[in-house]
Amino acid sequence: MQTDVMAPKLSRLFRLQWEESQQAYVLLYPEGLVRLNPSAAEILKRCDGRRAVDEIVSELETAFQASGLEADVQAFVAEAQQRGWLV
């Protein structure tokens, strides 16, 4: 599956939310939680099934005044798909 044309979204098995006790975004699932680093959280917040990966990259580069994020975002999306976080 090509991550540059798909519009990833969070699997129904997971819920993304800010966890005050962790001072971080987490992915909640029936067996526990995954504490996310800030970069992972920013990517996952944009994985809504409507935005393609290239749109997510563009938004992140604009929001954080950065460039060259495409490879990192694509790698994260691929890893998140393998872990079952994204469909």
Image (cartoon, helix red, strand yellow):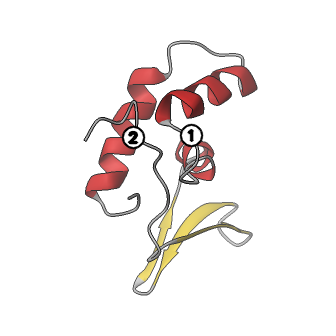
Answer left or right for 60 relative to 9.
Answer: right
In this figure, which residue is indicated by the disc labeled 2? 76
Circle 1 crowding by C-alpha within 10 Å: few under 14, some 14–19, many from 20: few
Instruction: Estimate how packed mark 2 is, as few (under 14), some (14 to 19) or many (20 or more) residues with alpha carbons within 10 Å.
Output: some
Q: Residue at image x 39%, y 30%?
A: 4
Which residue is at a point 55% across and 50% down the rendered structure image? 47
Q: Quadrant of the C terminus?
A: bottom left
Considering depth in this image, is 85 or 40 the residue closer to the camera?
85
Identify the disc placed on residue 39.
1
Numbered badge on residue 23: none
Q: Amino acid at mark 1?
A: Ser
Q: Quadrant of the N terminus?
A: top left
> x and y percent of residue 86 in the render?
41, 58
Please provide percent x and percent y for residue 59. Answer: 67, 29
* Quarter holding residue 77: top left
Q: Are marks 2 and 1 in contact (CB under 8 Å)?
A: yes
- Between circles 2 and 1, the one closer to the viewer is 2
Residue type, mark 2 in image: Phe
Q: Is residue 37 above or below residue 31?
A: above
